[in-house]
Image (spheres, helix red, strand yellow):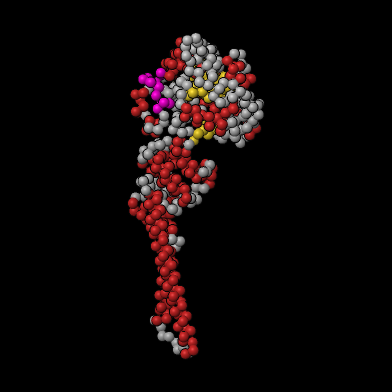
Amino acid sequence: MAEQKDRAADMAGRPAGGTGGGEGVRQEEQDGLAERAGGGGVNNAEAAEAKAERLDGGVNGAEEPEVPADHASDASGDRAGLQAELADSAGEGMRAVSEADAIGGELAALLNEEGTGVSLLVPMTIADVCLKATAMLRERGIAEPRSNAELLLLHVLELERAELLRDWREPFPPQRYRRWRELLARKAAGEPVQYLIGEQWFYGMPFAVTPAVLIPRPETELLVEAVLEAADRLWPEAAGAADAVPAARLGGKLADAGPGGAGGEARNGGLDAAAEDGGAPGGYGSGVAGPQLDAAAKGGAAVPTVVDVGTGSGAIGVTLAALRPRWRVCASDLSPDALAVARANAARHGAAARMTFVQGDLLGPFAQPRPGIGVDAAGGVAGLRIDVLVSNPPYIPAGDIAGLQPEVRDHEPRLALDGGDDGLTPYRRMAEQLMQLSALPRIVGFELGIGQAEAVADLLRGIGAWREIRIIPDYAGIDRHVLAIE
């Protein structure tokens, strides 16, 4: 037992990236499991046998004193009863050993089947499990193995990060091992952790994600910030929730607030559902343009109408609607499955009643109807006046997709990745479609790929409708966004 305690202490103290192991260590852990699972059965059996030996030595190995005849039968009966009791005790101990062996074999088979490449035997602390998973993911070539392991742990154990730190040295719950093993194996095979846990945080808010949508990236938050800043200058009266921006970036969900904007809970970090302004009547949010959008189409609106083209999970559109409750936001996508995810995220953040969702290709649904020319006007938004156009369209050159990271190439939707031969096809098409709108947007914001910024900026300069066109770098210094402002 001292050896097992030393081994447990060694496991608890190992740093990330060096869990050690080998087949010998795994076998020792399995042997230790059998003893622990048996509840001390080995010790019970040994103790019983030792006790029997001591009694036998006392009864058979020493000269017995004379016993009166009337007590002889009683002594003989007591001895027989005691030996029977000892036999029962020894039998229980041996049965416990057998049960421990069986349990250990079942656990080993359960936790090692399908070859996770790591031994996860009970009992282990949460820290042990995390460090072993990190080492295994690193061996499989998975990027950011520790972060992936921790995200899976938070999901499987249903803990917040602070709770994970609190319970770091607690035993890993055995009933969660099957689910943990399944998700770890999928992660080791290259599946994005965001799809495994069904969630990605964006701009301080959790967004549901599925394989139908691109996983939101941190650099896209910079596009949201740029649009908020530019629009607040053009429509200051509609920026009633401006104080919610820094609160949202602190993490958590948006707070419930009245028509005036974000409430006190948001400023204090107790973030919950998005601010509601009562919503618009007439089915707004159901995919049909409501009265507010109709009024905006006539021009002169005191609040902007914002269109998020290629919304995917709704990360951009829902975030803008949640942070600016007075804005009118429409989100479009070619994929009906993506729109379903975006709708769910809008509802999650209290913005569904103030948004409309349209299925269609790029700006096609919003083109001004012209005699003799058909318009893709799903959702009743044909001819809608768009004040702010924002889009993160597919921009990966088709020939580069094969060289992407396997997590992206093999799991994220190609529809959200493929930007044509040079990655610029969606931008060229939207530049042409802009001329078909009822009016040019006062703000246009695009996200783009590496080396595409100048080409997209030139497309917008060629239209000649905006006084300022600037390029915004991302966190790595790569020119990632183009913003055109009236």
Residue visible at 62% across and 21% down in the picture: 238
Where on the picture, by quarter, is residue 5?
bottom left
Picture quarter with the C terminus: top right
Q: Nearer the viewer, residue 198 or 53?
A: 198
* Farthest residue, direction bottom: 69
Looking at the image, which residue is at 48% across and 18% down? 376
Note whether residue 222 is visible. no
Q: Residue furthest front?
A: 372
Residue 256 image point, x, y percent: 63, 32
Left or right: 205 in relation to 50? right
Q: Nearer the viewer, residue 118 or 401?
A: 401
The magenta-colored residue range is 414-425
Quadrant including the N terminus: bottom left
Image position of 240 with respect to 146: above or below? above
By secondary structure, the bulk of the magenta-drawn segment is best described as loop
Q: Horizontal placement of 326 versus 479: left or right?
A: right
Classify 148 as above or below 43.
above
Looking at the picture, does residue 186 appear above or below residue 285?
Answer: below
Residue 177 seen: yes
Instruction: Report x, y in % for residue 370.
Output: 50, 10
